Image (cartoon, rainbow, N blue to C red):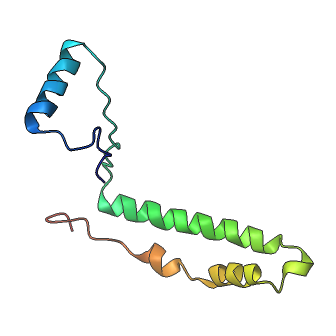
Amino acid sequence: MPRNPIGERPMTDAERQARYRAARAARLPVFRNRRPADHRSRARRWHDAVAELTNLQAQYVAWLESLPENLQDSATAEELQAIYDLDLSDLQAIQPPRGFGRD
């Protein structure tokens, strides 16, 4: 996603370089916002995602079981019941391939 322009028009390359050099000469701190790299393997990410889905399903089941009597026939209860009815055992049984030469 592009950043908002600083001025009325985009900076030229020379202006951008001059701004960079002036900031370095003034020893202003450099702010870099980078997301941390996810070093987990695809198989590990798969297992973590399935575990998260299973955990969420258990939380939704607990919510469904704790609904008051007057909400048992509501749209919320129907959606919670649909989540409860999902069979995640097929997802849990899948073992993704480990990759080239490691299968």
- Give me the residue at 14% from left, 64% from top: 101
Image coords of residue 75 (percent x, y):
74, 84
Image coords of residue 43 (percent x, y):
33, 63
Asked if 49 appears above or below 6 in the picture, the reply is: below
Q: Is residue 82 left or right of residue 19?
A: right
Res 57 → quadrant: bottom right
Quadrant, the N terminus: bottom left
Res 59 → quadrant: bottom right
Extreme residue in the top direction: 26
Quadrant, the C terminus: bottom left
Res 93 → quadrant: bottom left
Q: Is residue 60 left or right of residue 37?
A: right
Asked if 51 appears above or below 22 in the picture, the reply is: below
- Give me the residue at 26% from left, 70% from top: 97
Asked if 65 appears above or below 41 in the picture, the reply is: below
- Give me the residue at 39% from left, 65% from top: 46
Q: How many marks?
A: 0
Image coords of residue 77 (percent x, y):
76, 81
Asked if 54 appears above or below 5 in the picture, the reply is: below
**Which one is nearer the viewer's eye here, 34 or 22?**
22
Extreme residue in the front direction: 8
- Give me the residue at 75% from left, 68% from top: 62
